[in-house]
Image (cartoon, rainbow, N blue to C red):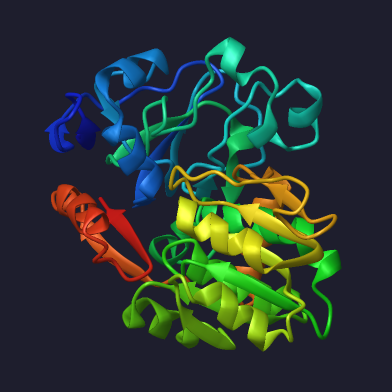
Amino acid sequence: MKALRYTKIGSAPEVVEIEKPTPGPGEILLKVTAAGVCHSDDYVMSLPEEDYLAQQYPLPLTLGHEGAGVIESFGEGVETGLQIGDAVAVYGPWGCGHCLNCSQGKENYCTNAVAEGIRPPGLGSQGSMAEYMIVDDVRHLVPIGDLDPVKNVSLTDAGLTPYHAIKRSLPKLGAGTVAVVIGSGGLGHVGIQMLKALSGATVIVLDVSDEKLELAKHVGADVTLISDESAAGKIRELTGGVGVDAVFDFVGANPTIATATAVAAMEADVTIVGIGGGSATIGFGSIAYDAAVRVPYWGSRSELIEVFELAKAGKVDVEVQPYSLDDAPKAYEDLHAGAIRGRAVIVP
Protein backbone atom coordinates (compact mmCIF):
# COMPACT_ATOMS: atom_id res chain seq x y z
CA MET A 1 0.00 0.00 0.00
CA LYS A 2 1.00 3.65 -0.36
CA ALA A 3 1.87 5.77 2.66
CA LEU A 4 3.25 9.26 3.28
CA ARG A 5 6.26 8.80 5.51
CA TYR A 6 8.90 10.92 7.18
CA THR A 7 11.95 8.80 6.40
CA LYS A 8 14.97 10.99 7.09
CA ILE A 9 15.44 13.79 9.61
CA GLY A 10 15.54 17.12 7.83
CA SER A 11 14.09 15.79 4.59
CA ALA A 12 10.62 16.29 3.13
CA PRO A 13 8.08 13.48 3.60
CA GLU A 14 7.68 11.09 0.69
CA VAL A 15 5.10 8.67 -0.67
CA VAL A 16 6.39 5.11 -0.45
CA GLU A 17 5.11 1.58 -0.86
CA ILE A 18 4.89 -0.43 2.37
CA GLU A 19 3.24 -3.65 3.43
CA LYS A 20 -0.46 -3.51 4.30
CA PRO A 21 -0.70 -3.96 8.08
CA THR A 22 -2.52 -6.82 9.80
CA PRO A 23 -4.38 -6.07 13.04
CA GLY A 24 -3.05 -7.83 16.12
CA PRO A 25 -5.06 -8.77 19.24
CA GLY A 26 -7.36 -5.92 20.24
CA GLU A 27 -6.52 -3.85 17.15
CA ILE A 28 -8.66 -2.60 14.26
CA LEU A 29 -7.66 -2.15 10.63
CA LEU A 30 -9.18 0.89 8.89
CA LYS A 31 -9.35 1.57 5.19
CA VAL A 32 -8.55 5.27 5.31
CA THR A 33 -11.00 7.65 3.65
CA ALA A 34 -9.41 10.95 4.76
CA ALA A 35 -6.42 12.24 6.73
CA GLY A 36 -5.89 15.80 7.90
CA VAL A 37 -2.70 17.86 7.53
CA CYS A 38 -1.62 19.83 10.60
CA HIS A 39 1.08 22.25 11.75
CA SER A 40 1.92 19.71 14.47
CA ASP A 41 3.27 17.41 11.73
CA ASP A 42 5.37 20.26 10.39
CA TYR A 43 6.64 20.92 13.93
CA VAL A 44 7.75 17.29 14.37
CA MET A 45 9.54 17.30 11.02
CA SER A 46 11.29 20.57 11.89
CA LEU A 47 12.93 19.14 15.01
CA PRO A 48 16.71 18.84 14.97
CA GLU A 49 17.98 15.25 15.03
CA GLU A 50 18.94 15.42 18.71
CA ASP A 51 15.47 16.60 19.77
CA TYR A 52 13.68 14.18 17.44
CA LEU A 53 15.55 11.18 18.81
CA ALA A 54 15.27 12.42 22.40
CA GLN A 55 11.48 12.34 22.07
CA GLN A 56 11.76 8.78 20.71
CA TYR A 57 9.89 9.39 17.47
CA PRO A 58 10.42 6.44 15.12
CA LEU A 59 11.86 6.50 11.61
CA PRO A 60 10.24 5.95 9.24
CA LEU A 61 7.03 7.53 10.54
CA THR A 62 3.73 7.48 8.66
CA LEU A 63 2.25 10.93 9.19
CA GLY A 64 -1.33 11.85 10.03
CA HIS A 65 -2.95 12.25 13.46
CA GLU A 66 -6.34 13.23 12.01
CA GLY A 67 -7.89 10.14 10.48
CA ALA A 68 -11.19 8.72 9.26
CA GLY A 69 -12.04 5.49 7.51
CA VAL A 70 -14.20 2.42 7.30
CA ILE A 71 -13.55 -0.67 9.37
CA GLU A 72 -11.77 -3.29 7.26
CA SER A 73 -11.16 -6.00 9.85
CA PHE A 74 -10.80 -6.72 13.56
CA GLY A 75 -7.94 -8.34 15.41
CA GLU A 76 -8.47 -11.20 17.79
CA GLY A 77 -10.49 -10.43 20.91
CA VAL A 78 -12.04 -7.12 19.83
CA GLU A 79 -15.41 -6.70 21.49
CA THR A 80 -17.53 -3.90 20.05
CA GLY A 81 -20.91 -3.05 18.64
CA LEU A 82 -19.21 -1.73 15.51
CA GLN A 83 -19.30 -3.69 12.27
CA ILE A 84 -17.01 -4.15 9.29
CA GLY A 85 -17.79 -1.32 6.87
CA ASP A 86 -18.82 1.18 9.54
CA ALA A 87 -17.61 4.76 9.00
CA VAL A 88 -15.53 6.03 11.91
CA ALA A 89 -13.14 8.77 12.94
CA VAL A 90 -10.03 8.19 15.00
CA TYR A 91 -9.76 9.78 18.45
CA GLY A 92 -6.11 10.82 18.34
CA PRO A 93 -4.71 11.40 21.85
CA TRP A 94 -4.22 7.75 22.78
CA GLY A 95 -3.72 6.92 26.45
CA CYS A 96 -3.37 3.88 28.66
CA GLY A 97 -7.11 3.43 29.17
CA HIS A 98 -6.89 2.68 32.89
CA CYS A 99 -5.61 5.76 34.75
CA LEU A 100 -8.11 8.15 36.39
CA ASN A 101 -8.13 10.59 33.48
CA CYS A 102 -8.49 7.86 30.85
CA SER A 103 -11.38 6.32 32.80
CA GLN A 104 -13.14 9.66 32.36
CA GLY A 105 -12.46 9.69 28.60
CA LYS A 106 -9.70 12.28 28.99
CA GLU A 107 -6.93 10.33 27.32
CA ASN A 108 -5.44 13.64 26.21
CA TYR A 109 -4.35 13.97 29.85
CA CYS A 110 -3.31 10.35 30.40
CA THR A 111 -0.85 10.16 33.31
CA ASN A 112 0.80 6.97 32.10
CA ALA A 113 1.26 7.61 28.37
CA VAL A 114 4.84 8.85 28.57
CA ALA A 115 6.01 6.09 30.90
CA GLU A 116 4.32 3.40 28.81
CA GLY A 117 5.53 4.81 25.48
CA ILE A 118 2.02 5.42 24.15
CA ARG A 119 1.96 7.92 21.26
CA PRO A 120 -0.80 9.34 19.05
CA PRO A 121 -1.01 8.13 15.45
CA GLY A 122 1.25 10.19 13.23
CA LEU A 123 2.97 11.66 16.28
CA GLY A 124 4.82 8.57 17.39
CA SER A 125 2.61 5.69 16.30
CA GLN A 126 2.09 5.03 12.59
CA GLY A 127 -0.52 7.44 11.28
CA SER A 128 -3.42 7.88 8.90
CA MET A 129 -1.75 9.14 5.71
CA ALA A 130 -1.85 5.75 4.07
CA GLU A 131 -4.35 3.51 2.36
CA TYR A 132 -4.79 1.57 5.61
CA MET A 133 -3.97 2.21 9.27
CA ILE A 134 -4.01 0.30 12.55
CA VAL A 135 -5.99 1.67 15.50
CA ASP A 136 -4.82 0.23 18.79
CA ASP A 137 -8.16 0.00 20.60
CA VAL A 138 -11.84 0.27 19.77
CA ARG A 139 -12.27 3.06 22.32
CA HIS A 140 -10.29 5.25 19.93
CA LEU A 141 -12.99 5.03 17.26
CA VAL A 142 -16.01 7.32 17.05
CA PRO A 143 -18.80 6.52 14.56
CA ILE A 144 -19.52 9.37 12.14
CA GLY A 145 -22.49 7.96 10.25
CA ASP A 146 -23.26 9.84 7.07
CA LEU A 147 -20.85 12.74 7.69
CA ASP A 148 -18.51 13.38 4.77
CA PRO A 149 -15.10 12.17 6.03
CA VAL A 150 -13.18 14.60 3.81
CA LYS A 151 -15.10 17.60 5.14
CA ASN A 152 -15.03 16.44 8.75
CA VAL A 153 -11.84 14.47 9.43
CA SER A 154 -10.12 17.64 10.63
CA LEU A 155 -12.63 17.90 13.45
CA THR A 156 -10.66 15.18 15.25
CA ASP A 157 -8.03 17.82 16.03
CA ALA A 158 -8.87 21.16 14.40
CA GLY A 159 -12.37 20.83 15.87
CA LEU A 160 -11.69 18.99 19.11
CA THR A 161 -8.81 21.20 20.21
CA PRO A 162 -10.65 24.55 19.96
CA TYR A 163 -13.82 22.97 21.37
CA HIS A 164 -11.96 21.76 24.46
CA ALA A 165 -10.35 25.18 24.87
CA ILE A 166 -13.59 27.13 24.42
CA LYS A 167 -15.75 24.85 26.55
CA ARG A 168 -13.69 25.65 29.65
CA SER A 169 -14.40 29.37 29.18
CA LEU A 170 -18.10 29.24 28.28
CA PRO A 171 -19.23 30.31 31.80
CA LYS A 172 -17.48 33.63 31.13
CA LEU A 173 -18.98 34.16 27.68
CA GLY A 174 -22.62 35.07 28.16
CA ALA A 175 -24.52 37.87 26.45
CA GLY A 176 -22.65 41.17 26.36
CA THR A 177 -19.20 39.61 26.64
CA VAL A 178 -16.30 39.78 24.19
CA ALA A 179 -13.96 37.01 23.00
CA VAL A 180 -10.83 37.39 20.89
CA VAL A 181 -9.53 34.76 18.46
CA ILE A 182 -5.94 35.19 17.29
CA GLY A 183 -5.33 33.32 14.05
CA SER A 184 -8.15 32.30 11.71
CA GLY A 185 -6.39 29.40 10.04
CA GLY A 186 -7.03 25.67 10.36
CA LEU A 187 -8.05 25.69 14.04
CA GLY A 188 -9.03 29.32 14.41
CA HIS A 189 -11.72 29.39 11.73
CA VAL A 190 -13.38 26.40 13.44
CA GLY A 191 -13.06 28.05 16.84
CA ILE A 192 -14.85 31.15 15.56
CA GLN A 193 -17.83 29.05 14.50
CA MET A 194 -17.92 27.29 17.85
CA LEU A 195 -17.90 30.56 19.75
CA LYS A 196 -20.80 31.83 17.65
CA ALA A 197 -22.74 28.58 18.11
CA LEU A 198 -22.16 28.12 21.83
CA SER A 199 -21.70 31.54 23.42
CA GLY A 200 -23.27 34.97 23.56
CA ALA A 201 -19.95 36.72 22.99
CA THR A 202 -19.03 39.26 20.36
CA VAL A 203 -16.08 37.68 18.52
CA ILE A 204 -13.08 39.78 17.51
CA VAL A 205 -10.57 38.05 15.21
CA LEU A 206 -6.94 38.97 14.57
CA ASP A 207 -4.76 37.74 11.73
CA VAL A 208 -1.89 39.04 9.62
CA SER A 209 -3.56 39.15 6.20
CA ASP A 210 -6.77 40.40 4.66
CA GLU A 211 -7.25 36.97 3.08
CA LYS A 212 -7.28 35.24 6.48
CA LEU A 213 -9.59 37.90 7.87
CA GLU A 214 -11.95 37.39 4.94
CA LEU A 215 -12.24 33.73 5.98
CA ALA A 216 -12.90 34.87 9.56
CA LYS A 217 -15.76 37.11 8.38
CA HIS A 218 -17.09 34.28 6.21
CA VAL A 219 -17.43 31.97 9.23
CA GLY A 220 -19.02 34.55 11.53
CA ALA A 221 -16.48 36.97 13.04
CA ASP A 222 -18.13 40.17 14.29
CA VAL A 223 -14.99 42.33 14.09
CA THR A 224 -11.70 41.68 12.30
CA LEU A 225 -8.37 43.43 12.84
CA ILE A 226 -4.88 43.06 11.44
CA SER A 227 -2.67 41.41 14.06
CA ASP A 228 0.12 43.89 14.70
CA GLU A 229 1.48 46.11 17.46
CA SER A 230 -1.58 48.34 17.34
CA ALA A 231 -4.13 45.53 17.75
CA ALA A 232 -4.15 45.51 21.54
CA GLY A 233 -4.83 49.24 21.71
CA LYS A 234 -7.67 48.95 19.18
CA ILE A 235 -9.29 46.16 21.19
CA ARG A 236 -9.01 48.23 24.37
CA GLU A 237 -10.74 51.09 22.56
CA LEU A 238 -13.51 48.80 21.32
CA THR A 239 -14.13 47.57 24.87
CA GLY A 240 -14.04 50.99 26.52
CA GLY A 241 -10.70 50.24 28.11
CA VAL A 242 -12.02 47.23 30.02
CA GLY A 243 -10.57 44.43 27.91
CA VAL A 244 -12.10 41.14 26.84
CA ASP A 245 -13.49 38.17 28.73
CA ALA A 246 -11.57 35.44 26.90
CA VAL A 247 -8.73 35.19 24.42
CA PHE A 248 -7.95 32.11 22.33
CA ASP A 249 -4.50 32.31 20.74
CA PHE A 250 -4.26 29.77 17.93
CA VAL A 251 -0.78 30.99 16.96
CA GLY A 252 1.16 30.91 20.23
CA ALA A 253 4.10 33.09 19.16
CA ASN A 254 5.60 35.71 21.45
CA PRO A 255 3.89 38.70 19.76
CA THR A 256 0.44 37.06 19.79
CA ILE A 257 0.74 35.93 23.40
CA ALA A 258 1.77 39.48 24.35
CA THR A 259 -1.38 40.77 22.64
CA ALA A 260 -3.49 38.13 24.38
CA THR A 261 -2.34 39.04 27.87
CA ALA A 262 -2.52 42.77 27.10
CA VAL A 263 -6.23 42.69 26.19
CA ALA A 264 -7.42 40.34 28.94
CA ALA A 265 -9.86 41.92 31.36
CA MET A 266 -9.97 41.18 35.08
CA GLU A 267 -10.95 37.53 35.67
CA ALA A 268 -10.55 36.78 31.97
CA ASP A 269 -9.29 33.54 30.46
CA VAL A 270 -6.22 33.55 28.21
CA THR A 271 -5.92 30.22 26.39
CA ILE A 272 -2.76 29.51 24.38
CA VAL A 273 -3.55 26.82 21.82
CA GLY A 274 -0.97 27.42 19.09
CA ILE A 275 2.51 25.91 19.17
CA GLY A 276 4.37 28.96 17.91
CA GLY A 277 7.06 28.67 20.56
CA GLY A 278 6.10 31.76 22.56
CA SER A 279 5.72 32.21 26.30
CA ALA A 280 3.65 34.48 28.53
CA THR A 281 4.91 36.94 31.09
CA ILE A 282 2.83 36.47 34.21
CA GLY A 283 3.11 38.42 37.42
CA PHE A 284 1.69 41.27 39.45
CA GLY A 285 1.20 44.22 37.10
CA SER A 286 1.90 42.27 33.90
CA ILE A 287 -1.65 40.94 33.44
CA ALA A 288 -5.08 41.96 34.73
CA TYR A 289 -6.08 40.90 38.23
CA ASP A 290 -7.24 37.28 38.54
CA ALA A 291 -6.83 36.52 34.85
CA ALA A 292 -6.10 32.85 34.16
CA VAL A 293 -3.67 31.54 31.55
CA ARG A 294 -4.17 28.01 30.22
CA VAL A 295 -2.30 25.77 27.80
CA PRO A 296 -4.74 22.96 26.87
CA TYR A 297 -4.00 19.87 24.82
CA TRP A 298 -6.44 18.27 22.38
CA GLY A 299 -9.70 17.14 24.11
CA SER A 300 -11.63 14.20 25.54
CA ARG A 301 -13.41 11.45 23.65
CA SER A 302 -16.82 12.68 24.82
CA GLU A 303 -15.95 16.16 23.57
CA LEU A 304 -15.13 14.70 20.15
CA ILE A 305 -18.59 13.15 20.06
CA GLU A 306 -20.04 16.58 20.89
CA VAL A 307 -18.00 18.16 18.10
CA PHE A 308 -19.47 15.72 15.58
CA GLU A 309 -22.94 16.55 16.89
CA LEU A 310 -22.24 20.21 16.05
CA ALA A 311 -21.21 19.14 12.56
CA LYS A 312 -24.35 17.03 12.12
CA ALA A 313 -26.42 20.05 13.17
CA GLY A 314 -24.72 22.18 10.51
CA LYS A 315 -23.15 24.54 13.06
CA VAL A 316 -19.53 23.81 12.11
CA ASP A 317 -18.25 23.71 8.54
CA VAL A 318 -14.54 23.13 7.94
CA GLU A 319 -12.97 24.80 4.93
CA VAL A 320 -10.88 22.08 3.27
CA GLN A 321 -8.44 21.74 0.39
CA PRO A 322 -8.24 18.09 -0.74
CA TYR A 323 -5.04 16.48 -2.00
CA SER A 324 -4.49 12.98 -3.32
CA LEU A 325 -2.09 10.73 -1.42
CA ASP A 326 0.39 11.08 -4.29
CA ASP A 327 0.21 14.86 -3.89
CA ALA A 328 0.53 14.78 -0.09
CA PRO A 329 4.09 16.20 -0.06
CA LYS A 330 2.74 19.26 -1.89
CA ALA A 331 0.19 19.74 0.90
CA TYR A 332 3.02 20.20 3.39
CA GLU A 333 4.78 22.60 1.06
CA ASP A 334 1.59 24.66 0.86
CA LEU A 335 1.10 24.46 4.62
CA HIS A 336 4.62 25.71 5.25
CA ALA A 337 4.05 28.56 2.77
CA GLY A 338 0.78 29.59 4.45
CA ALA A 339 -1.09 28.93 1.21
CA ILE A 340 -3.90 26.76 2.59
CA ARG A 341 -7.35 28.19 3.23
CA GLY A 342 -8.69 26.32 6.23
CA ARG A 343 -7.45 22.75 6.42
CA ALA A 344 -5.63 20.47 3.96
CA VAL A 345 -6.98 16.92 3.72
CA ILE A 346 -5.31 13.90 2.12
CA VAL A 347 -7.73 11.58 0.30
CA PRO A 348 -6.17 8.15 -0.42
- Picture mark count: 0
Q: Residue at x 22, y 31 (%)?
A: 6
Residue 245 visible in the displayed image = yes
User: To which quarter of the image does residue 235 belong?
Assistant: bottom right
User: To which quarter of the image does residue 193 belong?
Assistant: bottom right
Q: Left or right: 37 with respect to 268?
A: left
Q: Residue at x 55, y 55 (%)?
A: 257
Residue 20, image x, y percentages: 26, 27
Question: Which of 287/182 is in front?
Answer: 287
Q: Residue at x 15, y 53 (%)?
A: 330
Against 129, residue 175 (above or below) is below
Residue 260, image x, y percentages: 60, 62
Q: Left or right: 243 with respect to 331?
A: right
Q: Left or right: 56 with respect to 287?
A: left
Residue 205, image x, y percentages: 53, 77
Against 139, residue 279 (above or below) is below
Question: Which of 99/264 is in front?
Answer: 264
Residue 316 visible in the displayed image = no
Question: Which of 147/208 is in front?
Answer: 208
Q: Quadrant of the N terminus?
A: top left
Residue at the extreme top of the image, as rendered: 115
Against 241, residue 264 (above or below) is above
Residue 134, image x, y percentages: 42, 29
Q: Residue at x 46, y 48 (%)?
A: 85
